[in-house]
Amino acid sequence: MTESTYRIQGGTGEWEVVIGLEVHAQITSESKLFSGASTEFGAEPNTQVSLVDAAMPGMLPVLNGECVRQAVRTGLAINAQINKYSRFDRKNYFYADLPQGYQISQLYHPIVGEGVIQISLDEKDPDAHGKAIGVERIHIEQDAGKLMHDQHPTMSYVDLNRCGVALMEIVSKPDMTSPKEAAAYVRKLRSILRYVGSCDGNMEQGSMRADVNVSVRKPGGELGTRTETKNVNSMRFIQAVIEYEAQRQVDLIEDGGVVVQETRLFDPDRNETRSMRSKEDAHDYRYFPDPDLLPLELEDDFIFDCKASLPELPDEKRARYKNVLGLSPYNAAVLTAEHETALWFEQLLETTDQPEKIASSAANWVTSELFGALNRLGVGIEDSPVSPAQAAELLGLVADGTISGKIAKQVFEIMLESGDGAKKIVEEQGLVQESDTGAIEKVIAEVMAANEDKVAQYRDGKDKLFGFFVGQTMKAMQGKANPQVVNELLKKILG
C-alpha cells in the first residue's frame, strides 16, 4: 500500500485520515512585532522584555515594518494572494505567560490569502509523484511567553523573552492524507522559508513548530471531528502524532465513542497524545479589532519591491539544475532542498572555468563523498572543513587527469584532516597520476610475464580475466596509473 492511499485498518474496515497543519514560523527580525526588544535566542530569562511586552499601563504597540515585509515575501514565494488591506484583532484569553491578557493576531483580515505548496513523495524523481497542498492563509501574530516548570519543586516560573516575538501562522487546507505527506509539506515549507530568509526554520529552538489537526472518516465520507495537537517541533514527531491520533480516533469510534473537538499535547517519551483542553471557537476568545493599531494598507510599489527581492526558489533552482546543468532529478532535488547546500554547490561551480562541464561530476561528488564525510563528522555543509574552492581544485585535478578518482578519495581524506589544498597534498606526497605510456607498458609486460598462464587463458577466450590484468597493473603502480590509458594499452597488448 502506497502512502498516497494511507489507510487505518479498523475492525469495521478501512479508514482514511485527513490532516491540516497550522505552522507557526518565527519571523526573521532583530526586534519583536510591536516593540524594540531583542529576539536573540538563548538569553537569560526575562532579559529581553520591554515595557510593551510586559503590558505596563499606557504602553502602546508600534508595528515592526520588517515583519510585514517578510510575511509578504513569504506569501509571494508560495504564489499566494497578498491582501492590500489587513487588520489586527485582539484574541482574549488568560494565561500566566500572557501579560496583556490577550494576543494580537489577524483573524478576520489576514495579510496573505490562499496559496499553494508543491510537495513530492519520490526523492529519486520529485516530478513523478507530486501533489499540490493548499495554503488557506498566512497571518501575523505575537507569541506568548514561556512557563518554566523545572526551576522549583512547588512553583512555576515565567520567562517573557518570547512574549511579543513575531510569528507567521501558515494555515494549510486539509489536503494531506498521510504522515509522509505531512512531513513532506513541512519540509518543503521550511525550505522555502529558509530560501526567502523569513524564518530560520530551527525547530529545535522553537522558531518553527506545528499544530497538527487530525480527523478520520470512511474513505470518501463526511469529514470527521478533528483534534488539534499543539506545538509539535520535529518532522518525526509530526508523523508520530498523526499515526497515534488517527489510530486512537478509529478505536474510539469503533468502540461506540465520539471524538471530541479538543486541544491535545504530544508526549514524545510515551509516543502518545493526551487531552489538554476543549477546543474553543472564535466567539469564546471575544475577538475585536485592536483599538491601538490602525488597519494595515499596502501599496503596489511595496509589494513589487518585496517580489523583486525574492531569490531563486527551490523549485526554480531544481528545474535549472536539471535542464541547464544536466543533473539527474535526484541530485537536483538533493542539492536544492536546503539553501545552504545549493549555495555551497554554486560557489564550487563559480570557481571553475567551465561550470556546466563539471556540474554533473561535482553533483555526484557532493551528494556522495562530501555528504558522507559530513555525516561522519556530524557537521552541516556550512561548517564543512573543505571549502567550495578546495573541492573545485580537487575535482579539477581529476578532470585534467592529474590524479585518478581512487587517489582523489585519499586526497580528500587528507584535506578533511589537515585543511590543506588538493594540489599541495598531491605534490608533497607524489600522488600525480602516471599517464606515460612507456612506463605503463613496462609494468604491463612485467605483469604478463608473471602470469603467463592467465595470458594464455585470456587469449583462448576467457575475457573476464581482463579485469585481473587491470587490477594487477594498477596495484603494481600503487593506483597512480591512468585507468583509461591502462585499459587502452592492455587491450592493444593482450590482443
Image (cartoon, rainbow, N blue to C red):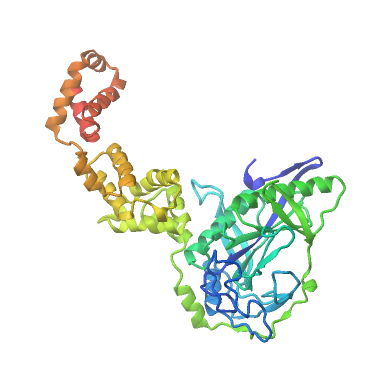
**Image quadrant for the C terminus?**
top left
Eyeballing the image, is 343 above or below 452?
below
Outermost residue on the top side: it is 453
Q: Can residue 16 be seen here?
A: no
Give the image location of residue 449, x and y in percent: 17, 17
| Residue at x 29%, y 20% (from the top left corner) | 465
Q: Which residue is at the far front? A: 153
Q: How many marks?
A: 0
Seen at 77% across and 47% down, the residue is 248
Quadrant location of the N terminus in the rendered image: top right
Q: Is residue 272 above or below residue 132?
A: above
Residue 158: image x %, image y %? 67, 67
Percent coordinates x, y for residue 442 in the rendering: 13, 26
Viewer can see residue 331: yes
Q: Nearer the viewer, residue 267 or 240?
A: 267
For the point 48% across and 67% down, the residue is: 197
Q: In the image, 468: left or right of 204? A: left
